[in-house]
Amino acid sequence: MTRWKTLPDLFDAACERHPDAVALVWDDELITYRQMMKQAEHVAGGLKARGFGPGDRIAFWLPNVPAYVVLLIACARLGVAAVAVNTRFGPGEVSDIVRRSGARALALWPDFGGLASDAVMTAIDATSLPRLEALIEVGGGAVRAGGWENAPRIPLESLLAADTYEGTLAMPDADCVTFTTSGTTSAPKIVVQPQHAIAHHAQDVAAAFGFGPRTVSLQALPLCGVFGFAQAMAVLASGGRLVMLAKWDGERAAGLIRQWEVDSLFASDDMVQRLLDTGQDFPSLNFIGHAAFNTALADIAERADTRGITLRGLYGMSECMALYSVRPLAAPVAERKKGGGTPVSPEARVRVTDPDTGETLPIGETGALEVAGPSLFARYEGNPEASAAAFTADGFFRTGDLARLEPDGAFEFLGRMGDVLRLGGFLVNPAEIEEHLQAHPSVRAAQVVAIGTAQGMRPVAFIIPADGQTLDDAALLAHCAPLARYKQPVRFIGIEAFPVTESANGVKIRRTELRRMAESELPPDKGPEPPQVVAVSRQREHKFSKANVAEISLVAGLGVEGDAHQGAAVKHRSRVAANPDQPNLRQVHLIHQELLEELHRGGFDVRPGAMGENITTQGIALLDLPRGTRLLLGETAIIEITGLRNPCAQLDKHRSGLMKALLDRTPDGTLIRKAGIMAIVIEGGVVKPGDPIRIDLPPPPHQRLEPV
């Protein structure tokens, strides 16, 4: 297969193969490939005559209309980059993107129904955009206020009437299109994609999805977003047909699917729900490429299946392009609905690394997703520091997402690293807790965030109650009892609606705002107790349990004075039998009181010291602490954490079923050991109940606790 390296070459080839095939459908207008390319040549000629050329930029603030595609091809032919501007942006956002991108012109449809372009432009001070030389007006309307009355105007009709430019100034490495990231806490970054990345990716997506001349795809997602843009480029590269929907409406979309016998579309879960709500059948529809944003619609794929609609999970972002990967069409729904999948490009590479150490993780383990391949972006505009930080030394892009590798080169997307909760020493996908909460009849939707406390990071749940229901903290806490203790929310907060950001790729919940709300609304009397010692224990003989005492003395390098495990070399009998000269990394055993409370709720009456620990703590998430953490106990004693205690069969001799209660698994199957931690004594001193505990973390990168 020929690998076209620029967008003009890609579209010229499609036109040469299918000149009279319909490329674009909009309302009752049908535009063939020959007509589309000829219009683009006229527009390119008109822009070139006005001095536009390589290195320039034109901002596109347009809905899904044929003019968007025609202008895009014309700009690409001239080496002019298209700056995608979300049609939902307000005055501040539009002016910011246009200003920072350095656009010389802004293409817009001032009076298009349903968009507030005219009103937004009126609110923008024309003098704030000194580099903006002209407005390219589509649809015959005009901006007539806000200081724009005298701005140079270029009606699209005048460009379509210009002499054609049939050559190309496009270069593979030249800027082709820019997208904005969907950040909610600062100005969005401007992602620059080069010509070769767009051309290569379009061909890879078309091949992976089986697009071709018979394809009829509904362009429901905005072209200003990378999700919709990647769809359009792939369909047109294959010679397929795009049925354009300027503004999303479920009934209108359903009508177009049936009218044009659409076989594919790409949509968010909310959009799929609107389609299902129409009650119509879609026998022509082969699949919907599906992005999950709303946890309340976690079963949308299964419900769509019952209607004969096949949803396929995807992955992508502006930096590596949407549709970077996809789930197999023939996979069972439980697999097919997951985000991620197999990369569409045979040249792509994917890996998962430990977010603390950077170590590459094996198949099945959860960590930070890093990707490589021909669809990677060139840079963040005007931000060389962020650009450099985004890539590893060997060329992988740090996505900021949580994932795990699957066999055969696939991966599962689990969420944004910023959204993921680090609880109990493990990375936890908030969707796991949210879906559990949403199974309760009083809950319509839930969002879970983590806030920092003296006990470590703890989950807080925001709840939209079901119709006619009220928030019942006790009932919800009881409902969460099957979850591991560290996954159980410390607070439930009722809310009428989640704060959201409307991006070009879908509506996204602003978890940063939820975290701020959680921190401000958690009352002081509901906060955790400060870290402290609640009990101390020792036992001279090797017995499973230890006796509670008024105080213990820690001896540097040895352990607890008078305890069976005191010594510089190992004292645990199984370790002695293996190698009596091993250093004793298990001088002091600690368990948190919160674990004993969890066991009590599960029907186990276990007191401090009963499981052999020397120190029982409260208000500190022991399992969250990294190896090498030092705990300052009382006035002088210091211990250093070496690892986890490995639960043993003696637990069941103490209480039947206790060992199972002290084991859990993360969603990816990783074993969680909850039986406490081990430490060595760095500085001696007396420790007694009520003594404060101070935490001294080691320098990063931090290493997760492993059994010792």
Image (cartoon, rainbow, N blue to C red):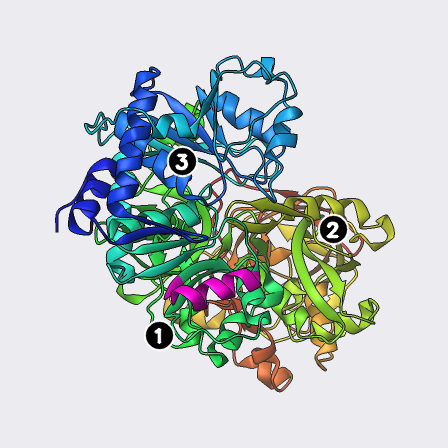
Side of 481 relative to 413 (left or right)? right
Q: Position of residue 279 (x, y in %)?
A: 57, 75
CA gap, disc 2 and disc 1? 49 Å
User: Extreme right residue here?
Assistant: 525
Whether 484 is drawn above or below 40: the answer is below
CA gap, disc 3 and disc 2? 37 Å
Q: Which residues are magenta?
A: 250-264
Whether 472 is drawn above or below 162: the answer is below
Q: Position of residue 269 (x, y in %)?
A: 54, 62
Side of 437 relative to 310 (left or right)? right
Badge 2 or badge 1: first in the primary sequence: 1
Whether 140 is drawn above or below 133: the answer is below
Instruction: Report the front residue among 307 and 252.
Output: 252
The kind of residue tagged 2 is Pro
Q: Image quadrant of residue 69? A: top left
Disc nearest the viewer among 3 and 2: 3
Q: Which residue is mark 3?
A: 390
Instruction: Report the front residue among 248 and 588.
Output: 248
Q: Are marks 3 and 2 in contact (CB under 8 Å)?
A: no
The kind of residue tagged 1 is Ala
The overriding secondary structure of the stretch rendered in magenta is helix
Mark 2, secondary structure of its residue: loop
Asked if residue 677 can be seen in this view, the reply is: no
Q: Which residue is mark 2?
A: 531
How packed mark 2 is, by other alpha carbons closer than 10 Å (few <14, some 14-19, many 20 or more), is some
Disc nearest the viewer among 1 and 3: 1
Badge 1 or badge 3: first in the primary sequence: 1
Residue 253 covered by magenta stretch: yes
Which residue: 50% across, 65% down?
255
Mark 3, secondary structure of its residue: loop
Mark 1, secondary structure of its residue: loop
Q: Which residue is mark 1?
A: 331
